[in-house]
Amino acid sequence: MAGAPMLQLQFMPAAELAGQASLGPDGVLGAACFGIEPPASLAALDLPLACVRVAPLCAGATPPVAAVCEVWTTAAPLRRGEHGRLRYRCSEEILFGTLSIPVADAEPVAANMAPAMQRAAERAYAELFAAVEALGFPHLLRVWNHVPDINGRSAGLEHYRLFNIGRQDAFLAFDRQIAGASVPAASALGAQDGSALVVYCMAARRPAAALENPRQISAYDYPRDYGPRAPTFSRANLARIDGQSVLFISGTASIVGHQTQHAGDAAMQTRETLRNIEALLQQAARRGAAGLRLEHLHYKVYVRHAHDLPLVRAELERAAGGGARVLYLQADVCRADLLVEIEAVAFPAEPESPC
Ligand code: 3EB
């Protein structure tokens, strides 16, 4: 539709976002910056900006790119604000928000002696739910989670597993479903020597539809082998925002059923991951988002070992073509045997109108 306030996603060097007058910051709904140190000029903008201590992998870039951004823009009128620790911007229909919770001083939500990481996760989600409910955007569509030292352990449990306990407790405390169509899409990755849990999200006034992958057991039904509480996320979410269909594909890995496939082989893990993403595109097609192919997607690719980048990139380019928009990042993935995780966003075409 001509003139519709379309939601868009762009990847760019941080310096470009900091310097690009045409982008706003007025037209920017929100952004995430991936780098060991975001440029001060960016941090100074009055913008909800998730600062994630994850290194970009921009092979061959001269000069080397120190920080890259994921930038969400819309032509819809925006409001901005803060609610507790959540910084946000919102249009009439969608809210982008971010918050950062220092793990060590996370206060318990309930009177409990849980390890700091579990408390931080429960705090983060409790503050997120309180904010989006108060602001009138109660439907969480998509959440990105960056957990410091995600594969490290405290109190005998991996930090990712502690994170899962705290996240699920917050869902339960806010009377939210922990399975089914209202569960948000998500990614959960590590962050380098950071001390804070960084969460950013998209939330909406109206509900969207979660999708699951028939090749995989729903994450919220994982058996206890992966931790005392299952992860609370859906495989994808299909929403309509500001006159635009948006498909959020969660962080996706080389998992079939509930088991990791191809341990130790980054190329084969990438292929299996792309098969899972294709299965999600088929599910989306059955819900009306027809015609989506791998080459149409925007990707973020998290590679555990930077030296696997050429293998991973070759597989993605073989499947999605050399022209796909891709942000490669070096990050730890939530299972120790996973070498790569890929998330994606697509903007399905509108159904043909009869006139
Ligand atoms: C998986 O499929 C891989 O805990 O929010 C992917 C996306 C993964 C989101 C999360 C975890 C999460 O289980 C890991």
Image: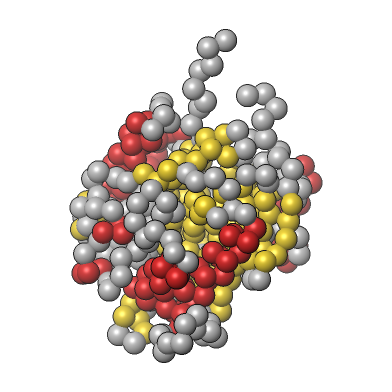
**Where, quadrant-wise, is the C terminus in this rendering?**
top right
Quarter of the rendering containing residue 42: bottom right
**Where, quadrant-wise, is the N terminus in this rendering?**
top right
Colour scheme used in the picture? secondary structure
For the view shown, which residue lies furthest in the bottom direction? 113
Q: Is residue 214 visible?
A: yes
Horizontal and vertical percent for residue 169? 40, 72
Foreground: 89 or 269? 89
Horizontal and vertical percent for residue 160? 37, 71
For the view shown, which residue lies furthest in the top direction? 355
Number of marks drawn: 0
For the view shown, which residue lies furthest in the front direction? 175
Q: Is residue 148 above or below residue 48?
A: below
Horizontal and vertical percent for residue 52? 56, 65
Q: Is 277 displayed left or right of 81 in the figure?
A: left
Q: Is residue 312 visible?
A: no
Q: State the residue at coordinates (65%, 58%).
A: 135
For the view shown, which residue lies furthest in the right direction? 21
Q: State the residue at coordinates (61%, 64%).
A: 131
Q: Is residue 114 above or below residue 321?
A: below
Horizontal and vertical percent for residue 63? 63, 55
Q: Is 174 displayed left or right of 277 in the figure?
A: right
Q: Is 89 displayed left or right of 151 in the figure?
A: right
Q: State the residue at coordinates (70%, 27%).
A: 3
Q: State the residue at coordinates (37%, 60%).
A: 178
